[in-house]
Image: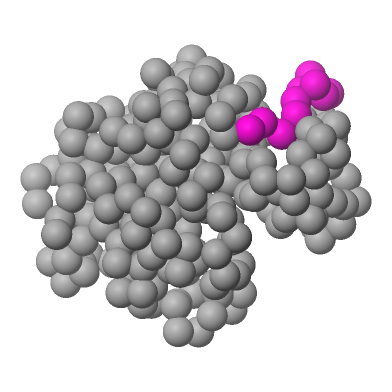
């Protein structure tokens, strides 16, 4: 069954990747505020499940790249309580003016920005096991009445399949690229069948030409598109929208996408 993808919002869909991450610290209230001020209609963010069952908005598995110590260092999101994570400064790496930024909860983002954006929630999970993350994300969406403003995405097709089983009517999207960090059997978007997804989210370089829309048979939402030339190229290939680090600098999305 095909379900509508954020049908109440104009095309193309445009998501600020982790907020306006080119100018503000990623996945922070400051980055989402900047996206709102710039008039970007959507944001993309990442969600981890903490050890005490909270939904922390943060990209990496560990805090070292953002909070000091380097990639792979610091606290691990899944084995830390949220209080310990929330005590970290996640803004200073971007500039001293952001030193007060902390890791937000998904519910806090909904409360502050739910009426301003449609939101792509990327579930961060490396396991096939059900840890309760998907159910908690759905509960937060329903509590904030964000069902018509959200889509759920992940590199993990098993996570997407669980979410789809809980709620068939919120769109889901499989993410992939050719990175060796991704299992070999998922590097061409094969997770679409495992996850029973509604949207395809390939890395932008994998969107080649206009034939893809028909060949892939699902809407395409590429990442990350940071120039007008690239935006126009993927729109011409039939992309539903884009995810961008520099959405504020692009003009291509401010005019209607060409009809496929």
Residue at 34% x, 57% y is 164
Which of the image's four quarters has the N terminus? bottom left
Q: Is residue 101 visible?
A: yes
Q: Quadrant of residue 7?
A: top left
Magenta stretch, overall SS: loop
205 vs 212, left or right, is right
Residue furthest top as drawn? 37
Give the answer, above or below, for where 239 lies relative to 99: below
182 vs 2, left or right, is right
Q: How many marks?
A: 0
Magenta residues (range):
96-105
Residue at 73% x, 55% y is 78
- Residue 259 position in % (x across, y down): 9, 45
* 124 or 235: nearer the viewer: 124
Q: Specify how the rendered protein is coloured.
A: one colour
Give the answer, above or below, for where 72 lies relative to 191: above
- Residue 157 position in % (x across, y down): 43, 68
- Residue 146 position in % (x across, y down): 37, 30
Residue at 36% x, 44% y is 151
Residue furthest right as drawn? 69
In magenta segment, residue 148: no
Q: Quadrant of residue 94?
A: top right
- Residue 136 position in % (x across, y down): 53, 45
In magenta segment, residue 101: yes
* 166 or 6: nearer the viewer: 166
Q: Is residue 233 visible?
A: no
* 42 or 109: nearer the viewer: 109
Residue at 58% x, 46% y is 47
């Amino acid at each position: 069954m095909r379900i509508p993808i954020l049908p109440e919002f104009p095309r193309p869909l445009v998501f600020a990747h982790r907020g306006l991450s080119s100018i503000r610290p990623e996945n922070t209230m400051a980055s989402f505020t900047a996206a709102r001020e710039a008039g970007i209609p959507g944001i993309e963010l990442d969600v981890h499940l903490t050890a005490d069952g909270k939904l922390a908005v943060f990209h990496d598995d560990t805090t070292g790249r953002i909070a000091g110590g380097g990639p792979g260092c610091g606290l691990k999101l899944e084995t830390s309580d949220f209080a310990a994570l929330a005590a970290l400064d996640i803004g200073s790496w971007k500039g001293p003016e952001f030193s007060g930024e902390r890791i937000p909860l998904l519910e806090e983002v909904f409360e502050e920005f739910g009426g301003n954006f449609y939101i792509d929630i990327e579930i961060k999970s490396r396991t096939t096991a059900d840890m309760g993350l998907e159910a908690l994300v759905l509960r937060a969406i329903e509590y904030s009445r964000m069902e018509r403003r959200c889509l759920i995405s992940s590199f993990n097709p098993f996570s997407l399949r669980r979410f789809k089983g809980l709620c068939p009517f919120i769109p889901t999207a499989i993410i992939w690229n050719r990175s060796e960090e991704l299992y070999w059997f998922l590097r061409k978007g094969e997770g679409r069948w495992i996850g029973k997804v509604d949207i395809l989210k390939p890395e932008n370089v994998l969107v080649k030409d206009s034939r893809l829309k028909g060949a892939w048979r699902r809407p395409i939402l590429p990442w990350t598109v940071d120039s007008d030339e690239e935006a126009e190229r993927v729109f011409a290939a039939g992309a539903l929208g884009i995810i961008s680090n520099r959405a504020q600098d692009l003009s291509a999305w401010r005019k209607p996408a060409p009809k496929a």
